Image (cartoon, rainbow, N blue to C red):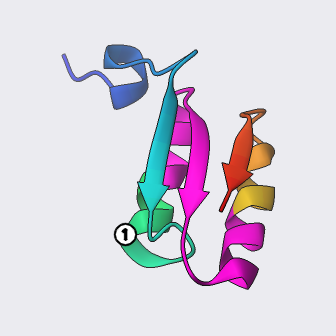
Amino acid sequence: MKNSINELISLKGKRAIVTGAAAGIGAAIAYRFAEIGANLELVDIDMKGLKRVKGEIEKFGNDVKYL
């Protein structure tokens, strides 16, 4: 029987720091962590990209901050 990662792992109530979060692998990791309940600190030099990713992740209901 296959389980999704959402059934196996929960990061609800945890905070994750994701570097390079404005695009690519960093953004993908941020989205995945958000899906499994993590609150996030997003870091990147691309502020425009960070604001975009932050806005999209906030739709999950997670607390998201960026630097």
**Residue 1: percent from left, percent from top:** 18, 16
**Of residues 39 and 3, the one drawn nearer to the viewer in this rendering:** 39
**Of residues 65 and 37, the one drawn nearer to the viewer in this rendering:** 65
Q: Is residue 4 above or below residue 59?
A: above
**Residue 31: percent from left, percent from top:** 54, 51
**Residue 15: percent from left, percent from top:** 53, 30
> In this rendering, would 39 be left or right of 56?
left
As for residue 34 lying within the magenta part, the answer is yes
- Considering the image in quadrants, where does the C terminus appear? bottom right
Q: Residue at x 77, y 69 (%)?
A: 51
Q: Is residue 13 above or below residue 45?
A: above
Q: Residue at x 35, y 19 (%)?
A: 9
> In this rendering, would 6 be left or right of 53?
left
As for residue 16 lying within the magenta part, the answer is no
> In this rendering, would 5 be left or right of 19?
left
Q: How many marks?
A: 1
Would you identify the image quadrant in which residue 54 lies? bottom right
Near mark 1 (Cα within 10 A), the count class, few <14, some 14-19 or many ≥20, is few
Residue under label 1: 25
Q: Amino acid at mark 1?
A: Ile
Q: Is residue 38 above or below residue 64?
A: above
Residue at the left extreme, as displayed: 1
> In this rendering, would 23 be left or right of 26?
right
Stretch in magenta:
30-53
Q: Is residue 15 above or below residue 8?
A: below
Residue at the front extreme, as displayed: 67
Q: Residue at x 47, y 46 (%)?
A: 17
> Disc 1 on helix, strand or loop?
helix
